Amino acid sequence: MRFPGRIFTITLAAVSAAGTLAIAAPAQADATPTYTCDVAVPGRVVLGHGNCAASNGAVAQGEFQGESLVIARREPRLKFHCRDGGRAQLPDGVVALGCQRIP
């Protein structure tokens, strides 16, 4: 059975768009809410303080749930992946729970 040229073109465009979305999805999955502060005090509970900024949809004021990253600007530039939410009061600081240091 032959398909009319127009239907084939529309189908090909839809498949191409779906492929593009599938390729873009992993990049979006890495958009973890992030807090960048001058200092991050390590531990299972991480305290980030000093000129903190939120990015990737991180909450600026109040409690938050789920994953987050806390990154220190100053040496030793520590970075933490936290899984259990926390509380932000930017720009003063952020407390994140269930954290592990990452390279």
Image (cartoon, grey):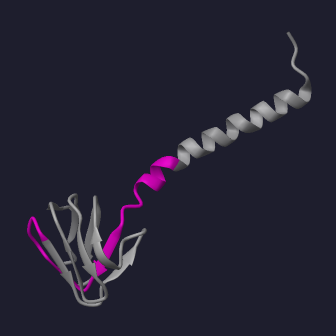
The answer to whether 12 appears left or right of 92 in the picture is right
The magenta region covers 25-45
Asked if one can make out residue 103 in the rendered structure from this viewpoint, the answer is: no
Q: In this rendering, is residue 81 above or below 26?
A: below
Q: Residue at x 90, y 31 (%)?
A: 6
Q: Residue at x 24, y 90 (%)?
A: 50
The answer to whether 80 appears left or right of 51 in the picture is left
Q: Quadrant of residue 71?
A: bottom left
Q: In this rendering, is residue 36 above or below 51?
A: above
Return the x and y of residue 61 as percentages of the image width and height.
32, 80
Q: Nearer the viewer, residue 98 or 8?
A: 98
Q: In this rendering, is residue 62 above or below 67?
A: below
Return the x and y of residue 1 as percentages of the image width and height.
85, 9
Return the x and y of residue 53 as percentages of the image width and height.
35, 82
The answer to whether 74 appears left or right of 25 in the picture is left
- Residue furthest to the top in view is 1
Numbered marks: total: 0
| Quadrant into which the C terminus falls | bottom left
Q: Residue at x 37, y 71 (%)?
A: 58
Does residue 33 belong to the magenta stretch?
yes
Asked if one can make out residue 16 in the rendered structure from this viewpoint, the answer is: yes
Q: Nearer the viewer, residue 100 or 90?
A: 90
Q: Quadrant of residue 15?
A: top right
- Residue furthest to the front in view is 62
The answer to whether 87 appears left or right of 53 in the picture is left
Does residue 36 belong to the magenta stretch?
yes
Q: Quadrant of residue 17?
A: top right
